[in-house]
Image: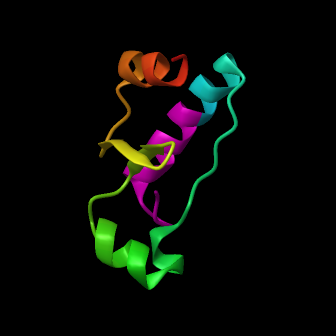
Amino acid sequence: MTRAGCPSCSTAEADVARICADLDVDWRAVDVDTDPELRAEYGDRVPVIVIDGAEHGYWRVEEDRLRAALTR
């Protein structure tokens, strides 16, 4: 979950893109401001990483933890 113009989101997106490319895992960014429910849920707590519908983490990418979650 991201937001346009969010520097932390840009950094997280680059990290996720790199990690997912290494692991050959598909991913997508969703702008929370495109949906009122997402905006209400995530507010200023972006970026948020969601894996298989469950929140994995927010504000920054913990690379080792993300890699472990994606290879289970």
Q: Is residue 4 magenta?
A: yes
Residue 59, compared with residue 46, is above or below; it is above
Q: Position of residue 38 (x, y in %)?
A: 41, 72
Image quadrant where residue 58 sits: top left
Name the residue at the bottom extreme: 36
Q: How is the image coloured?
A: rainbow
User: In the figure, is residue 42 to the left or right of 13?
Assistant: left
User: In the figure, is residue 64 to the left or right of 23?
Assistant: left
Residue 48, compared with residue 17, is above or below; it is below
Q: Is residue 50 magenta?
A: no
User: In the figure, is residue 60 to the left or right of 18?
Assistant: left
Which residue is painted at 27% across and 66% down in the image? 44
Q: Position of residue 60 (x, y in %)?
A: 33, 38
Q: Which residues are magenta?
A: 1-16
Which residue is painted at 68% across and 29% down in the image? 25
Image quadrant where residue 39 sits: bottom left
Which residue is painted at 43% across and 25% down in the image? 66
Image quadrant where residue 14 sits: top right
Q: Which secondary structure dominates the residues rendered in magenta?
A: helix
Residue 58, compared with residue 67, is above or below; it is below
Q: Position of residue 36 (x, y in %)?
A: 42, 84
